[in-house]
């Protein structure tokens, strides 16, 4: 019987010490970050002068290295990001993990021979996303943690790229790439590797956003059989001991093609957990209990970890790599030739032409002794090494020349021989698309409402475009908003397609999509398509990636300043969010249920609030009422205060926006009309808190 190929085991390397631990534990690959543009800026990471040695160590052991450039990049940072990529390239990285679709375009241009893996921040949720990534030059998709086993199987069977899945480590409560909470509350962007983890704090007297760590060790046989290419352990902020212990367990399970025992899971929990583990997304048990997935780091957890560290706190050094074959050829009048082979590769180097011996000729024994001195390198000669030495009579070679052969051959086993790229001193603009402002056209006024009941007669007069969630669309609107996420579920996809057809039949002229994967669902229907802020567009190349595929307009990331937005808006038809409570999180589970208890079937019709330690109130609203029918209820947590720019008309006029967008979430119809009146009159904001675009 043919067995499914064992997936790669991918371990975190947040420091040189953790990298060594991962190699010693048997990882097939590691992922690491440099000094910038990685999603774990709080980790020790790798300085430029540490990269080559780290990657050489990995390659000596047959371990692949994936380097992270998995943050959003702004226009003025693109050159620096390419320089960081070049450092990884020259050091020998096997692939780059990328989140920004603008940066990925440039990487394909300047480093065409370097594989790209799409970060989970890029929003990989299904087959449509995988197909887009393949067309965009990616070879692997790191998929969302919220996928179930059935989702994974469907994805693997239909994906043109490799699929990587997280199997262990911390879980974000927000769907990856959909979190603005840390950025908007404290100015530390999770999309930029600076997350302050406000989700781990108490709200409304409990911890409704703090999830247990993920552990899929009990499902290894299902994962292996699913067809995933890589099993990933989260933990670049964790200790070398953590990396060694967790990687060792998963390596054993993969090699033995079995699920973890209860004692192995207890050991993993002792190493690190938050009130135990969860596998609820994977099993589809998210909705069995409102508190099933919640967990905090308790004193008992800390004591268990302390005990585990006493037993195995210092991971061993990686074993030396055995030289399986070593050969030397010395011929009259020819360059010397030295060859090394290991289980992971081979290298041959040519050296000086051997000289005629004036006194004592070189012997095979002497040559072998010199060539076997691998010292502090990762290699060693053993009694099992096959050694072949061919030396013509009456030749000699100095110890220095032999040592040079050995050093260069050992280096060739671990390095790529790549040369520096010719990077431009400044990144050229991706192209120019005439905007409304450039042609003198009036700036479009668009509004998003969560409920048809909010759409007033005044709103219909004031706004050119009115949007409702796809599941709630009616003739009060002329556009619809797609869900944040569509999973690989045939029923869900068919439901979405039917709702789109219904909206178009009712007269919809506009659509807002949440990611690149959704574009094929709305193309060819005569709709004007906007790429929403969920695309995380923070540079002109990311804007180009969306516009070139058929979107009519792009909504710029609200994490940018007005001047940064304007740089993009000058070249691409752009929308700026000028009013409303921003969605800070979109969750893969029902947060309302965590606060209110068992679902009574009507929770998706109501609102709840999170109250933080300062008294700030964050509204929670179900993504759309129709989501209750799918068994995939998702909550959206909105900011405690709205953006307000009603008295900043002059500043907005200087920005080349094609459209201004208003987001009405918890406002009553009367409050909607009040906001419209304030923007008409240019009134100052009311007291009670608001946010500016700076």
Image (spheres, grey):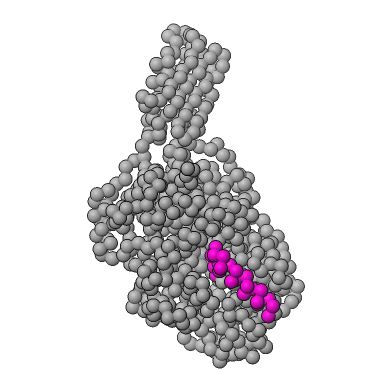
User: What residue is rendered at 39% in x and 71% in y?
Assistant: 288
* Magenta region: 484-506
* Quadrant position of the C terminus in the picture: bottom right
Q: Residue at x 57, y 14 (%)?
A: 333
Secondary structure of the magenta portion, mostly? helix
In terms of depth relative to the viewer, which is nearer, 10 or 568? 10
State yes or no: residue 499 in magenta: yes
Question: Is 572 part of what is drawn in magenta?
Answer: no
- Whether residue 42 is visible: yes
Could you tell me how many numbered marks the image carries?
0
The reply to whether residue 575 is in sight is no
Furthest toward the right, the residue is 439
Residue visible at 39% across and 16% down?
365
Looking at the image, residue 415 lies above or below residue 34: above
Closer-to-camera residue (167/122): 167
Q: Give the camera-side residue of 53 and 155.
A: 155
**Residue 605 horizontal/vertical position (percent):** 49, 82
Residue 303 spot, x, y in % from top left:
24, 60
> Relative to the observer, which residue lies in front, 432 or 480?
480
Q: Position of residue 295 (x, y in %)?
A: 34, 67
Q: Tell me where residue 67 appears, x and y as whole percent.
A: 49, 50
């Amino acid at each position: 019987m043919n067995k499914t190929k064992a997936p790669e085991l991918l371990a975190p390397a947040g420091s040189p010490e953790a990298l060594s631990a991962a190699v010693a534990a048997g990882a097939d690959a590691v992922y690491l970050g440099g000094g910038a543009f990685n999603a774990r800026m709080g980790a020790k990471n790798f300085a430029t002068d540490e990269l080559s040695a780290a990657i050489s160590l990995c390659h000596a052991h047959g371990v692949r290295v994936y380097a992270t450039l998995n943050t959003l990049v702004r226009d003025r940072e693109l050159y620096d990001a390419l320089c960081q990529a070049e450092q990884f390239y020259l050091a020998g990285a096997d692939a780059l993990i990328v989140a920004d679709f603008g940066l990925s375009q440039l990487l394909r241009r300047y480093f065409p021979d370097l594989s790209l893996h799409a970060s989970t921040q890029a929003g990989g949720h299904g087959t449509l996303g995988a197909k887009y990534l393949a067309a965009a030059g990616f070879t692997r998709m790191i998929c969302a943690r919220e996928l179930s086993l059935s989702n994974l199987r469907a994805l693997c069977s239909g994906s043109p790229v490799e699929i990587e899945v997280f199997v262990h480590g911390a879980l974000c409560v927000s769907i990856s790439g959909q979190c603005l909470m840390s950025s908007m509350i404290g100015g530390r962007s999770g999309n930029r590797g600076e997350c302050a983890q406000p989700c781990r704090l108490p709200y409304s007297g409990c911890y409704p956003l703090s999830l247990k760590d993920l552990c899929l060790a009990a499902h290894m046989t299902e994962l292996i059989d699913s067809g995933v290419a890589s099993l990933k352990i989260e933990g670049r902020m964790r200790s070398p001991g953590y990396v060694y212990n967790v990687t060792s367990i998963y390596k054993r399970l993969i090699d033995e093609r079995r699920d973890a025992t209860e004692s192995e899971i207890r050991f993993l929990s002792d190493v690190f957990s938050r009130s135990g583990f969860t596998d609820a997304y994977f099993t589809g048990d998210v909705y069995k209990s409102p508190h099933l997935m919640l967990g905090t780091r308790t004193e008992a957890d800390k004591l268990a970890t302390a005990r585990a560290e006493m037993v195995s706190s210092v991971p061993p050094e990686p074993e030396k790599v055995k030289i399986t074959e070593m050969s030397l050829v010395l011929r009259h009048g020819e360059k010397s030739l030295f060859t090394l082979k290991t289980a992971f590769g081979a290298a041959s180097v040519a050296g000086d032409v051997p000289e005629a011996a004036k006194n004592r000729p070189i012997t095979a024994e002497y040559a072998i002794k010199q060539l076997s001195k691998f010292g502090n390198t990762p290699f060693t000669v053993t009694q099992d090494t096959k050694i072949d030495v061919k030396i013509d009579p009456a030749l000699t070679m100095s110890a220095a020349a032999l040592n040079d052969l050995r050093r260069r051959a050992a280096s060739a086993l671990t390095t790529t021989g790549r040369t520096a790229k010719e990077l431009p001193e400044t990144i050229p603009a991706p192209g120019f698309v005439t905007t409304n402002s450039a042609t003198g056209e009036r700036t479009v006024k668009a509004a998003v409402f969560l409920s048809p009941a909010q759409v007033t007669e005044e709103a219909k007069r004031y706004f050119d475009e009115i949007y409702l969630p796809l599941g709630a669309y009616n003739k009060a609107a002329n556009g619809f908003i797609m869900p944040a996420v569509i999973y690989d579920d045939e029923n869900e996809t068919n439901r979405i397609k039917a709702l789109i057809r219904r909206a178009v039949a009712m007269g919809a002229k506009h659509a807002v999509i949440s990611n690149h994967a959704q574009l094929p669902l709305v193309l060819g229907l005569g709709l004007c398509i906007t790429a929403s802020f969920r695309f995380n567009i923070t540079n002109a190349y990311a804007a180009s990636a969306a516009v070139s595929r058929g979107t009519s307009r792009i909504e710029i990331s609200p994490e940018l300043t007005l001047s940064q937005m304007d740089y993009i808006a000058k070249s691409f038809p752009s929308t700026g969010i000028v009013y409303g409570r921003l969605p800070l999180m979109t969750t893969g589970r029902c947060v309302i249920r965590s606060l209110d208890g068992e679902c009574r079937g009507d929770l998706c019709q109501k609102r709840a609030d999170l109250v933080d330690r300062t008294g700030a109130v964050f509204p929670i609203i179900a993504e759309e009422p129709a989501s209750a029918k799918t068994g995939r209820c998702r909550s959206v947590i909105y900011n405690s205060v709205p953006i307000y720019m009603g008295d900043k008309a002059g500043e907005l006029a200087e920005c080349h926006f094609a459209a201004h967008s208003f987001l009405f979430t918890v406002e009553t119809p009367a409050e909607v009309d009040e906001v419209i009146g304030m923007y008409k009159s240019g009134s100052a904001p009311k007291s009670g808190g608001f946010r500016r675009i700076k």
